Amino acid sequence: MSYKFLEHTADIKIEAEAPSLEGAFSETASALKEVISGDIVVLSQIKKEINVKGKDLQSLLYNFLEEFLFLLDSESFLLWKVEDVKIDEKNFTLKASLIGDNAENYHFTNDVKAVTYNDMRIDFDEKKKSWKIHVVLDV
């Protein structure tokens, strides 16, 4: 599993790849966490369970990533890692456990305004037998 940042004119573009769809979603969340908090080590003080729905895989990914921005803004929850991601591809639902801490305990400067549908792609590579996600963050 891995992610990297790609060239983009004004925003931040992420490419995440993993053998499973759940792993690719988790890697995308890890990249978002890095954009928000850089290399800050966030303590594992708080655990949250989330349930997210979408009308297709792209909206499910969008809603999944927006959940982290919502939790940061509304509950001051700073993500450290995502665990136990389970995706129902037929109903476009996702359940996951989030580990993190109170954002007020940290100083970070990167502000992600939103996740965008611009250039968003979720593809399965038959040759590599892996899922690849591209997503752009508005910063």
Image (spheres, rainbow, N blue to C red):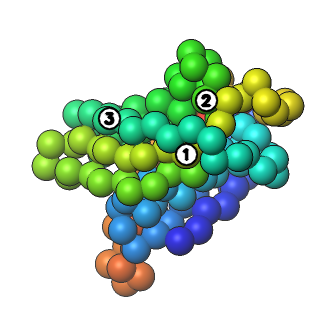
Of the residues under marks 1 and 2, which one precedes in the sequence? 2
Q: Which residue corresponds to the image point at 15% horizontal and 43% vertical from the top-left? A: 91
Location of residue 17 with respect to 59 vertically, above or below: below
Amino acid bearing label 2: Phe
| Residue 96 coordinates in the image, percent (x, y) | 38, 47
Amino acid bearing label 1: Ile
Q: Which residue is mark 1?
A: 99
Amino acid bearing label 3: Val
Could one spot residue 129 in this view of the protein?
Answer: yes
**Could you tell whether 14 is left or right of 128 in the image?**
right
Of the residues under marks 3 and 2, which one precedes in the sequence? 3
Q: Which residue corresponds to the image point at 81% horizontal and 33% vertical from the top-left? A: 106
| Residue situated in front as seen by the camera: 25 or 124 | 25
Q: Which residue is mark 3?
A: 52
| Residue 130 coordinates in the image, percent (x, y) | 40, 74
Q: Which residue is mark 2?
A: 77
| Residue situated in front as seen by the camera: 125 or 98 | 98
Q: In the figure, residue 95 lies in which quadrant?
A: top left
Mark 1–mark 3 Cα distance, whole angstroms, equals 16 Å
**Could you tell whether 38 is left or right of 138 in the image?**
right
Could one spot residue 79 in this view of the protein?
Answer: no
Of the residues under marks 1 and 3, which one precedes in the sequence? 3
| Residue 46 coordinates in the image, percent (x, y) | 57, 38
Location of residue 42 with respect to 126 vertically, above or below: above
Mark 3–mark 2 Cα distance, whole angstroms, equals 17 Å
